[in-house]
Amino acid sequence: MKTIVETSTGISKYLFEDNETLIVTADNITVGNPVRFRIGDLNSNNTTITENVTNAPSDWYGCKYTFDGTTWAANSNWVDPREDDGE
């Protein structure tokens, strides 16, 4: 697996298979070949990409964990966006 981590917070934003194509530029990150989508708020200036990750949590979800290149930790500020808030 490979993860895209927001450098300033250490939060793992995305998790992909190692064979997924990521093109990181100063403007954005494109995913796929052909391109399936663009990540407009992340780029080469604010992210770290770690490949060959073998210990991703089984319940990984975007922003749920931080990752320092070796160790995963729960993000104490994470709120599950899938939970119904009653509205």
Image (cartoon, rainbow, N blue to C red):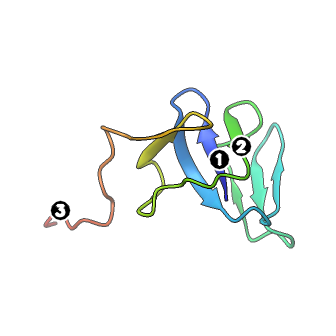
| Residue highlighted by disc 3 | 85
Residue 50 sits in which quadrant? top right
- What residue did someone put label 1 on? 4
Looking at the image, residue 83 sits to the left or right of residue 37; the answer is: left
Secondary element at tag 2: strand
Image location of residue 49, percent across then percent down: 71, 43
For the residues bearing labels 3 and 2, Cβ distance under 8 angstroms: no
Query: At which x and y percent is residue 74?
Result: 37, 42
Residues packed near mark 1 inside 10 Å, few (<14), some (14 to 19) or many (20 plus): many
Closer-to-camera residue (61/84): 61
Query: Which residue was labeled with disc 2?
Result: 49
**Label 1 with label 2: CB-CB less than 8 Å:** yes
- Which three-letter amino acid code belongs to the residue tagged 1? Ile
Q: Tell me if residue 52 comes above or below residue 11 in the rendering.
A: below
- Specify few, some or many for label 2: CA neighbours under 10 Å numbering under 14, 14-19, or 20 or more: some
Residue visible at 51% across and 30% down?
9
As helix, strand or loop, the secondary structure at mark 1 comes to strand
Marks 1 and 3: CB-CB under 8 Å? no
Image quadrant holding the N terminus, namely: bottom right
As helix, strand or loop, the secondary structure at mark 3 comes to loop
The mark nearer the N terminus, 3 or 2, is 2
- What's the distance in space between the residues labelled 3 and 2, CA to CA? 33 Å
Amino acid of disc 2: Ile
Q: How many dots with numbers? A: 3
Q: Residue furthest top?
A: 8
- CA separation, marks 1 and 2? 5 Å
Can you say which quadrant of the picture contains the C terminus?
Answer: bottom left
x and y, in percent, of residue 18 in the image: 75, 61
- Residue 17 in the figure: left or right of residue 10: right
The mark lying in front, picked from 1 and 3, is 1
Where residue 25 sits, quadrant-wise, is top right
**Could you classify mark 3 by the number of other residues whose Cα lies within 10 Å: few (under 14), some (14-19), or many (20 or more)?**
few
